[in-house]
Image (tube, helix red, strand yellow):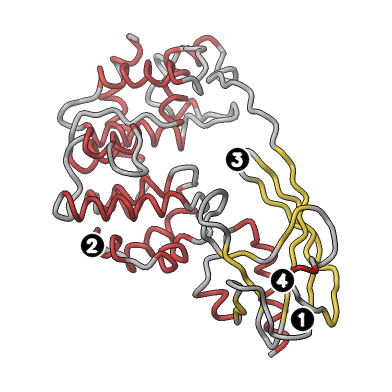
Amino acid sequence: MRELESLPPLLLEWYGRCARILPWRSEPTPYRVWVSEVMLQQTRVEAVRPYFLRFMDALPDIPALAACPEDVLLKLWEGLGYYSRARNLQKAAQRVAGEYGGALPASFEALRSLPGIGDYTAGAIASIAFGLPCPAVDGNVLRVYARICGDGGDITAPRMKQKVTRAVGEIIPLNAAGTFNQALMELGATVCLPNGAPLCQRCPAKGFCAALAQGRVGELPVKAPKKARRVEKRAVWLIFWENRVALRRRPDKGLLAGLWEFPNELGDGPLPPDWGIGACSEEYGGQAKHIFTHMEWRMAIRLVRAASGVLPPGWVWAAADELEKTYAVPNAFQRAVELAGEHLRGMD
């Protein structure tokens, strides 16, 4: 661990020169830090930036988030994926409004108890927003640690994360905890890159990085192999009637819970007769694919002109502007949304 002891002053100096300018860094209030950290889970910084700004405009504080109608919240989140993050944000905001007077608590343990906040997010908020000396260990930090220390442990293993958390906790500067945590994450995101292509000559730790000295940069960090994704073939129907397209809401639990979708079914069969929808015409709309963490959808899209406006209970007819502004449709159906929009504009 001696390598890490030399890191803080060099890393802080580097971060002062090289940190990216990001909207949540320019005004690191607890609420802004919290929302940005949740958005950044599983999502790239550049993808998050416009969503964050739009979210702050619409829901500038915890009371606004707590009171927001769910459909509006999900529409604001549309395209970011992992929609449980948005729901947990709101659940936590409602608890904070009721239990903490609308202000996030300045305590790692209290933050950790809120819905959707794990060890990393609690450490990030506690250190960045409140200056508490709490480690915030994400994938970037695990990678930086493994390379600097030459550690071949599996970074997906809980034991390894606990080890790194302890190590970071021992070197975190008490007077610059939030800046140090951000600097570690920034180093992993912009210099100590994954997939064997780090920019070692730009790294403030190049003089004592074990992986660089040993020629093992491409070998580290070590990750256990992922399980193969399950593949599902689905038929997706774009059903049109009088300049509108049919949508239905997904179940309240499970994958993409509560979001709106184009009617779809497993397999590649005909329009299900139990939907009670008569088709005046049907044509093939092409293929689409979407990859979830553990599953892949391969979709055949079909365009159907309905014989009447009768839909199954709970389904809706959505006009083009409603598809764009009102109904939250997940990214899995992005190609279908594009086709529906093109078709609806052509019907005007």
Q: Quadrant of residue 111?
A: top left
Secondary element type, mark 3? loop
Give the labeled residue for mark 2.
Answer: 63
Name the kind of residue labelled 3 in the image.
Thr
Amino acid type of disc 4? Leu
> What whole-number distance in Å separates the C-alpha atoms at marks 4 and 1?
17 Å
Quadrant assignment for the N terminus:
top left
- Quadrant position of residue 55: bottom left
Q: Name the residue under label 4.
A: 339
Q: Name the residue under label 1.
A: 306
Of marks 2 and 1, the one in the foreground: 1
Q: Is mark 4 on a helix, strand or loop?
A: helix
Residue 64: horizontal and vertical position, in percent?
A: 27, 65
Q: Which of marks 4 and 1 is nearer the N terminus?
A: 1
Could you say whether the residue bearing mark 2 is in a helix, strand or loop? helix
* Label pair 3/2, CB-CB below 8 angstroms: no
Residue occupied by mark 3 = 293
